[in-house]
Image (tube, rainbow, N blue to C red):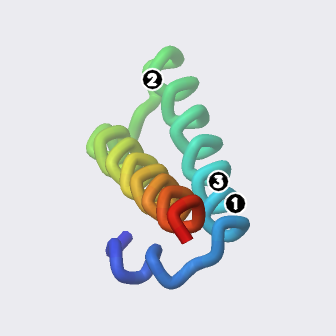
Amino acid sequence: MKTKDLEGLSKEELSQKEGALKEELFKLNTQRYTGAVEKPHMFSLLKKDIARIRTIMNAKRKSSLQA
């Protein structure tokens, strides 16, 4: 996911995307414990995408507080 794509989304859309990514990460973790992970590189990608979304949400929150 690109940062510029995420910046154009509203707060509600960002929180929905974050929830979906967290669900996917949870599914991957359950696969990890059963020993059936097909794409182990997805752990780091999902975590980075969640961090990007949280960063953008915090920046939007701070800008709305200053305005």
Where is mark 1, residue-wise? 16
Residue furthest front as drawn? 67
Q: Secondary structure at mark 2?
A: helix
The residue singled out by tag 2 in the image is 32
In this rendering, the answer to whether 65 lies above or below 28 is: below
Q: Which residue is mark 3?
A: 20
Q: Amino acid at mark 1?
A: Gln
* Coordinates of residue 2 in the picture (x, y in percent): 33, 74
In x, y percent, where is residue 32?
45, 23
Relative side of 19 to 42, left or right = right
Quadrant of the image occupied by residue 39? top left
At x 58%, y 32%, the residue is 26
Label 1 neighbourhood size at 10 Å, few (<14), some (14-19), many (20+)? few
Q: Nearer the viewer, residue 52 or 46?
A: 52
- Tag in front: 3 or 1: 1
Label 3 – label 1 distance at C-alpha: 6 Å
Q: Amino acid at mark 2?
A: Arg
